[in-house]
Amino acid sequence: GASQAPWSALREQLKGVSDVERITARTALRQVRPRELVALGKTLQKAELLAQNGQAPEPYLAQIFSHLQPPEGCTELLRRAIDEEPAALVRDGGVIASGFDAELDELRGIQSNCDAFLLDLETREKARTGIPNLRVQFNKVHGFYIEVTGSHLDKVPGDYRRRQTLKNAERFITPELKAFEDKALSANERALAREKWLYEQVLDQLQPHIPRLTRLAHALATLDGLCTLAERSLTLGWCAPQFVNEPCIEIEAGRHPVVEARLAETSSGAFIANHTRLNANTRMQVITGPNMGGKSTYMRQVALIVLLASMGSHVPAASCRLGPIDAIHTRIGAADDLANAQSTFMLEMVEAAQILHAATPHSLVLMDEIGRGTSTFDGLALASGIATHLHDKTRAFTLFATHYFELTELPAKARHAINMHVSAAESGSDIVFLHEIQPGPASRSYGIQVAKLAGMPAPVLHHARHALAALEERADEGELQVDLFAPPPRPRCRHQARWRPRWPPSTRTSSAHAKRWMRCTSSRSWRGIEADKHHRLAFPGDRHAPLPRDTGRHRRRRGPPGGHACARGAAFGARQGAGHGP
């Protein structure tokens, strides 16, 4: 490996290099601007020096330096033809350098001598006419003229021809001034036309060299990229990857180069390095853990290390051992494509399908929270199917991040899959992310704690905690998700939709009866619950004696089958029974 000093010197020389590829493309289309040609000329001079001074013992680098030699005559042509500070556009003039074309220089001489001629003419006319405030001027409307104020009009000679009358002055022209005007204006137009013609001639001479200029641009870009990678490797402690024939991705203390650099810039602490082990026996990692714990960063870092190694660079790790990798397939992030009528979930499924069709046993696949864009059961089923297909059929190296903890059961059935999780530590109601990838499944997602860190209002967090507790209780009882598409029971009264079951007004309710009541109300399951004619609920197997008959005078409406009763009627009857009737 080369020492740091030569690469640093080379990078300094490359700092003033322009975008040769873009300028060359615009030259081929004859759309290049004068200032871009100046930049191209300066870049060709630098490239020529690099080609002469570059030392490249390796054949690959020697070939790069050989392509840095500019086409013969291009550098000199641009140096002689284009002015160092040209106008932005050719039509503005002043683009072709002085001394490049004799005819253009002569026409420009006429333009430059204009001021001197006008000053001399004004001095002579003042002496001839005796008019002290006589002036010789020019404007784009009337051209050249001699202006005389009204108080001196009696002194105007006979060879003055009136060109314009003003309120307090007259403007005239003489035969001598008219002849000079024709010559000067013609010289200006001819000089501009000559410049445009010469500029086109320069472009014509550059056209045969476009292929070589394109190769030179690629050589400069390659050299710049290699210098940058060499500098990063030396200053950040990257290692040289080892390539083997066996299928594996083994990374010791791997790091994400962008996140690591950002942490160093902001003094936010050191980056937590992590190991990666994927081989013939372990082809899939099912990664679980809290939001913001580092799952996506870990997956991206593995992909970046594989990509850097595949392009011949050192990698941000203590050591790296790689087998043949033919592609990196990713399904990370959430986005939609409204122009093509694709929702977020549809786009996610399209990309996942493309990966399943294209991936091979030598591919690296990243799947981040697949199936989150739909209902819980659908998303879990799809995620499970995709993970199983990648493990059994595709057999690609896969990092599968998910919040579906049911997927942590996959390694028990798939022998080439293992569970991994990102660690976190709880401190009261707060959470500390450790960003370490450890074996085994995670137990929680800590979504509410992350929402607290994001500044969510306290009432929202309070409500979320109670809702989470209720949902977890329902999950323990076997109901994971409400069927969103089940038809609702057909109401028989207009207040049916707002009816909610209340605690039965019975002092003889047993604990078993209370448990059945809570289980039925929490799970929203009303099968087997019957209502008597007084709309009191009775459960299957309830042996309690019927409740006392309500003596209210209000005649309640009959409720629907299954115990649904009219809320307003039931409430009125309860008031009647309590002695609050009309």
Image (cartoon, rainbow, N blue to C red):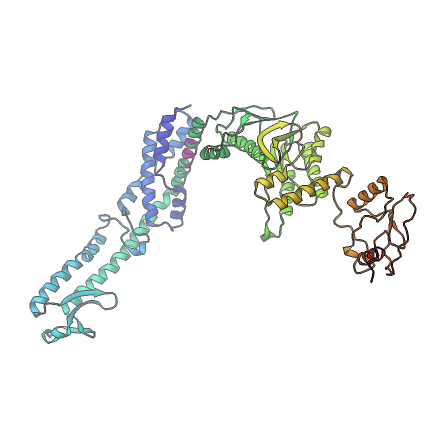
Instruction: Report the residue that reaches farthest toward the bottom.
Output: 154
Q: In which quarter of the image is residue 59?
A: top left
Q: Is residue 456 visible?
A: yes
Residue at x 89%, y 44% (from the top left corner): 540
Magenta stretch, residue numbers: 221-227
> Where is residue 164 shown, x and y percent of the image?
21, 73
Pick the residue in front: 496 or 193.
496
From the viewer's perspective, tell me whether residue 198 is left or right of residue 436.
left
Instruction: Report the residue that reaches farthest toward the front.
Output: 579
> Where is residue 578 shown, x and y percent of the image?
83, 55
Q: Total marks drawn?
A: 0
Q: Can residue 332 be seen in this view?
A: no
As displayed, is residue 148 above or below residue 398?
Answer: below
Q: Does the magenta stretch include residue 72?
A: no
Q: Is the magenta stretch mostly helix, strand or loop?
A: helix
From the viewer's perspective, tell me whether residue 39 is left or right of residue 576.
left
As displayed, is residue 39 above or below residue 93?
Answer: above
Query: Where is the C terminus found, in terms of image quarters?
Result: bottom right
> Where is residue 121 shown, x and y percent of the image?
12, 63
Q: Quadrant of residue 233?
A: top left
From the viewer's perspective, tell me whether residue 528 is left or right of residue 15.
right
From the viewer's perspective, tell me whether residue 116 is left or right of residue 74.
left
Query: Where is the N terminus found, in terms of image quarters?
Result: top left
> Where is residue 223 shown, x and y percent of the image?
41, 33
As displayed, is residue 379 above or below residue 313?
Answer: below
Residue at x 64%, y 25% (from the top left corner): 280
Pick the residue in front: 335 or 512.
512
Q: Is residue 225 magenta?
A: yes
